[in-house]
Amino acid sequence: MPERRLSRTSGQSLAARLFKPNYLMVYATLGIFALLYLFGALLYGGKGFTTLRTFVLLFSDNAYIGISAVGMTMVLITGGIDLSVAAVASLTGMIIAYGTTVMGLDPIVCIAFALFVGVGLGLLMGACIQYLNVPPFITTLTGMFLARGVTSLISRESISIKNDLISALAGFKFYLKWPNEAGEWVKIKPVASIDLNTIVFILMIIIGAIILQKTRFGRNVYAIGGNEQSAKLMGLPVARTKVLVYGFNGLCSVLAGVSYALYVKSGWNLALQGAELDVISCCVIGGVMLSGGVGYMQGTMLGVLLKATIPAIITFNGSMNSWWAKIFTGLLLLLFIVIQRAVVASSAKARKT
């Protein structure tokens, strides 16, 4: 009897953990992504939509958005926002392009300098938000203008990156293979390969998930987003945590800029304009609440894939305008905001009863 009671309790606790209200948004994202992918498969499966190559491209073509979304997820969970992510990524690309092509510097030096600038700007914005009580929207908007301005001061023209190391990193491919009838490992047809950007994207998602769910720092992030005053009363390091979150977001923005530079092999002062909204929308679609306190890296990754599937379907259609992707993304965003409000309302009602 005790063993049966213990197993029943364990099963109930597992079920309770799997079906927590906070997970409902992630399940909703997964369900809609599955339905959308199935829709594309039914319509364009014969054109190659269901191939492994197309699925891998969902990661590689949007890796820079996903890498930036890792840092944005933490910022949103604390109840903040960062509008400077795309500008910092653009500045990073310009630093790499100008440094390697015009000045002849080693790309490692350029990337290290970009990391110093991006992380430093993130820490500075975090300090202004925490210690000067400047709203995150205003602080990061200032950071966005600052980064865009510096990028334009460096160069107003697009600069192609001509460097052997950058070309090697951009051309890195890990080909997916499958055993044939003779037992030999051969490349999957059509050829599917994983590039460096995809690997970094997946690694950042894993690292971000571990930080949020397995470390004290991650628990502090959730506590601050849930109720900052309560977190202070509990003696949690609120100030340090918030500043470090913005510093980590700056790191992710720089890595996103490196990813984008490898993707396009150039730097431009107007690159990634408006991409900060794409990053935020991926997080929200993935179940991160703008009010703070709720969100998971797994959901953010699904949000990136879901958002990437829409233009993929439009591309396979061939007759639809690319602006339809923006329209459908807006409708999805509205849907998930409504779902978020419904989850919050149901949770509040459950607590009262």
Image: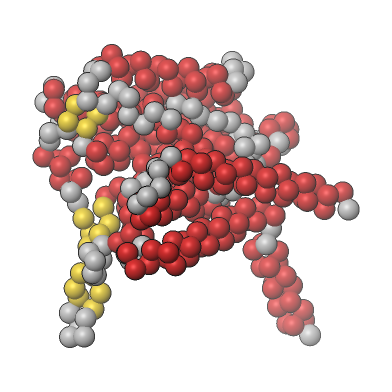
Q: Nearer the viewer, residue 159 or 118?
A: 159
Q: Please tell me which residue is depicted at 35% across the width and 52% down the height of the picture.
A: 318
x and y, in percent, of residue 233 in the image: 73, 33
Determine the residue positioned at 73% across, 48% down: 342
Q: Residue 347: x, y in percent? A: 77, 50
Left or right: residue 297 versus residue 318 is right
Above/below status of 141 relative to 331: above
The quarter of the displayed image where residue 325 is located: top left
Can residue 295 be spotted in the picture?
Answer: no
Please tell me which residue lies in front, 276 or 247: 276
Tell me: residue 147, above or below residue 319. above
Residue 102 against residue 16 in the figure, above or below: above
For the N terminus, the image quarter is: bottom right
Q: Is residue 301 above or below residue 68?
A: below
Tell whether 316 sits left or right of 292: left
- Image coords of residue 44 (percent x, y): 38, 63
Residue 331 placement (x, y as % from top left): 57, 44
Left or right, 276 with respect to 19, comes to left
Pick out the residue farthest to the front: 319
Q: Depth check: 86 or 199 in front?
A: 86
Residue in view at x 55 percent, y 49 percent: 286
From where the camera sits, is residue 280 visible?
A: yes
* Residue reaching furthest to the right: 353
Q: Which residue is at a point 45% across and 51% down the rendered structure image?
A: 310
264 sits left or right of 61 in the view: left
